[in-house]
Image (cartoon, grey):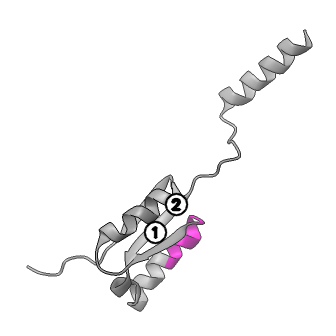
């Protein structure tokens, strides 16, 4: 009977969706040149702060951040880019 109560309590907790020990992880990925622009730095820093995230700054190619993103095994990633002003 005691085992059944423990099992049912565990099942209830699982079904209620009580979060596990793993918290969601979040990264903000931004180009170094963009991050050096004060206005865009503020955007990236605010996103990191709001989501308790990690900042990944890459030099030239977005692909540079791929290995770092994979190694960190994040749940979410936000990519910050300046809008294209041509045209």
Q: Give left or right: position of 12 versus 3.
A: left
Pointer 2: what residue?
26
Binning the other alpha carbons within 10 Å of mark 1 as few (below 14), some (14 to 19) or many (20 upward) gives many
Q: Is residue 68 above or below residue 23?
A: below
Residue 45 shows up from this direction: yes
Image point 77% across, 25% down: which residue? Answer: 10
Q: CA distance from mark 1 to mark 2?
A: 7 Å
Quadrant of the rendering where the N terminus is positioned: top right
Q: In which image quadrant can residue 29 be found?
A: bottom left
Residues under numbered marks 1 and 2 in contact, where contact means CB atoms less than 8 Å apart = yes
Q: In which image quadrant can residue 67 be found?
A: bottom left
Residue stretch in magenta = 45-52
Farthest-out residue, top: 1
Secondary structure, mark 2, is strand
Image point 86% across, 14% down: which residue? Answer: 3
Closer to the camera in the image, 16 or 10 = 10
Q: Is residue 53 above or below residue 34?
A: above
Question: Is residue 63 covered in magenta?
Answer: no
Q: Is residue 2 above or below residue 62?
A: above
Closer to the camera in the image, 82 or 7 = 7
Which SS type dominates the magenta stretch? Answer: helix
Pointer 1: what residue?
28
Instruction: Return the x and y of residue 33 as percentages of the image width and height.
Output: 34, 87
Question: Is residue 50 covered in magenta?
Answer: yes
Quadrant of the rendering where the C terminus is positioned: bottom left
Image point 51% across, 55% down: which residue? Answer: 74
Instruction: Return the x and y of residue 17 as percentages of the image width and height.
Output: 65, 34
Instruction: Return the x and y of residue 42 as percentages of the image width and height.
Output: 47, 83
Q: Is residue 87 above or below residue 23?
A: below
Instruction: Return the x and y of residue 6 as percentages of the image width and height.
Output: 84, 20
């Amino acid at each position: 009977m005691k085992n059944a109560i423990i099992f049912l309590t565990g099942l209830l907790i699982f079904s209620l969706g009580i979060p596990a020990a793993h918290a969601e992880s979040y990264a903000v990925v931004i180009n170094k040149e963009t991050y050096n622009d004060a206005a865009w730095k503020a955007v990236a820093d605010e996103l990191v702060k709001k989501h308790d995230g990690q900042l990944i700054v890459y030099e030239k190619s977005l692909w540079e951040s791929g290995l770092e993103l994979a190694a960190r095994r994040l749940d979410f990633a936000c990519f910050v880019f300046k809008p294209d002003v041509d045209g």
